[in-house]
Image: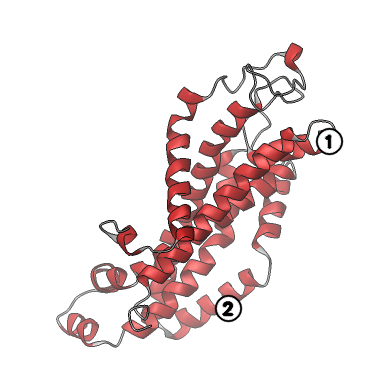
Amino acid sequence: MRMPGVLGEVRGPLAWAGAVTVLALVAIAVLAPFIAPYGIQECRLEDKLAPPSPEHWFGADPRGCDVLSRVLLGTRISLVVGVSVVSVSLVVGFVVGSVAGYLGGAIDRTFQFVSDCFQAFPGILLAIALMALARQGSVALVIAALCVSGWVGYARLVRAQVLGLRDVDYIVAARAMGAGVPRILTRHVLPNILSPLIVEATFGMAAAILAEASLSFLGLGVPPDVPSWGAMLNSGRKYLLDHPGFAIWPGLAIMLTVLGFNFLGDGLRDALDPRRAAR
């Protein structure tokens, strides 16, 4: 089975399972307000802790909100956070890493020192500290907290790629013809490093979604009225013995999402690896 473009080179059942999962998640995120049986704030106290039924397929949570609706609507929050974190981190990482790798010298040494400092401190702990200092949660704050250290991995990847490209013939020719650094980086370097960046961004989506769920589970993520899989896990763990579905369904959503992006990333890595044909 083949498809045109990048996905046409993706092979293997796990890679295709990841691609189908990601496409299904995107469709759910777009259609969630229309397919969810109830709205975000549509909760009824008389349905508190209701078991699965035709009215509430996944049951109702302690506030009387429909679990299925919140799981579907939580897909949008997770993907918004993932796409935003990866987009911002990717842009910042490309600019910083390409400049450091291309210019070298003191700029490159400063970048290496700064990136080493960031990587010496776990990113999730830095995000927890920033969210605790903010003392209030919001989607924008979660995105900003995850981007603070998220750009480092992309920057180091770009720097390594640029170091191998800056002395090739077409880069030297462009420099000799008077092309400026921005033009060389965007017109000649970027197209040649897109493949590893796409793969890294795919894995970064899974990491960002898992980090957002972790922050929300700890009560440091989005506000309580915003549907988040991590917050649903936190509230559902108190009723794990009597009503396990409250924690099982958002946990399954997180697991399938992370697995989908990881499987897709593995497939893209194999498809875009120039050594695959030789093997």
The numbered mark, 1 or 2, whose residue comes first in the sequence reads 2
Residue 33 percent across, percent down from the top left: 48, 25
- The residue shown at (62%, 49%) is 255
x, y (%) of residue 150? 55, 61
18 sits left or right of 212 in the view: left
In this picture the colour scheme is secondary structure
Q: Nearer the viewer, residue 86 or 39?
A: 39
Q: Position of residue 30 (x, y in %)?
A: 43, 34
Q: CA distance from mark 1 to mark 2?
A: 44 Å
Q: Please report the residue visible at 66 percent of the width from the left and 33 percent of the height from the top.
A: 223
Amino acid, disc 1: Lys
| Badge 1 density bin: few <14, some 14–19, many ≥20, Cα 10 Å | few
- Answer few, some or many: residues within 10 Å of disc 2's Cα (few below 14, many 20 plus, some between 14 and 19): few
Q: Secondary structure at mark 2?
A: helix
Label 2 belongs to which residue?
113
Residue occupying the far top of the picture: 46
The image's mark for residue 63 is none
Q: Quadrant of residue 116?
A: bottom right
Q: Residue type at mark 2: give it.
A: Phe
The residue positioned 29% from the left and 88% from the top of the image is 167
- Tell me if residue 93 comes above or below residue 3 in the rendering: below
* Relative height, residue 35 to residue 162 (above, below): above
Q: Which residue is mark 1?
A: 238
Question: x%, y% of residue 25?
Answer: 48, 42
